Image (cartoon, rainbow, N blue to C red):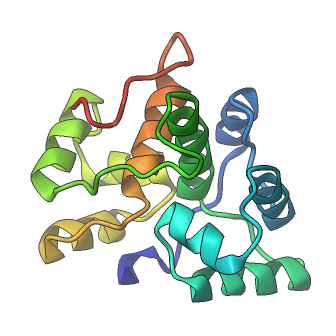
Amino acid sequence: MSGLRAPVANTVDEGDALAGRGCAMDSYQKFFSWCDRQGLKADREIAEAFGMTPQTVRNWKHRLEAGEGVPPTYLGLACVGFESARSTGNGEVPRLEPMTVDFFKTWREHRGLETLESTGGAFGLTRQAIHNWFKRDRLPRWLPLACLGYEVRTSPEGSGAAASNP
């Protein structure tokens, strides 16, 4: 996941949109409080739920303790996706199928995210990060939850379509 080292922070507008969906992640404190409310207490539980490594979760906790940083946009979207998937019966800790690169290309096109810049902007990442996914033919494990969260956040009804529907 080397393209993910320099995430772009949520903007005020994105934060407000996420707040309207019950998951404003403008601080690591809010993220870990949200995890606690979801029953995700241990680093390993959080890591498994979001397709991260336990070390990533520990790094976020260090940032929290140091009062540094804002969680990346994709994390807030993944929280929204988590809540949506859970509410539709995908289990206490939702498990979505991994995305293929071809599926993700189709998903992007159907949502008007036609450029690497627009896709990066949607997830709070750089154009280069998205380029690396395609170049390596590998997508991050958190992407299905974040895509579902994006759908929920951008749908007019607020319910979104399942990430399995391009």
Residue 153 pos. (x, y %) = 55, 29
* Residue at (47% x, 19% y) in the render: 155
56 relative to 118 in the view: left or right: right
Question: Image height check: is 51 above or below 56?
Answer: above
Placement of the N terminus among the 4 image quadrants: bottom left
Residue 158 horizontal/vertical position (percent): 56, 18
Q: Is residue 68 above or below residue 147?
A: below
Image coordinates of residue 47 in percent, x first then y, are 57, 73
Between residue 155 and residue 87, name the one nearer to us: 87
Figure label count: 0
Identify whether 61 is placed above or below 101: below
- Quadrant location of the C terminus in the rendered image: top left
Return the residue nearer the eye: 37 or 140: 37
Q: Position of residue 122 (x, y in %)?
A: 45, 45
Q: Which residue is the extreme one toward the top?
A: 157
Which residue is pictured at 68% across the width and 86% down the height?
Answer: 59
Q: Residue at x 63, y 70 (%)?
A: 45
Residue 98 occupies which quadrant of the picture?
A: bottom left
Query: Residue sitting at 73 percent across and 42 percent down?
Result: 12
Q: Nearer the viewer, residue 135 or 148?
A: 148
Q: Outermost residue toward the left? A: 102
State left or right for residue 25 relative to residue 133.
right
Left or right of 116 in this view: 118: right
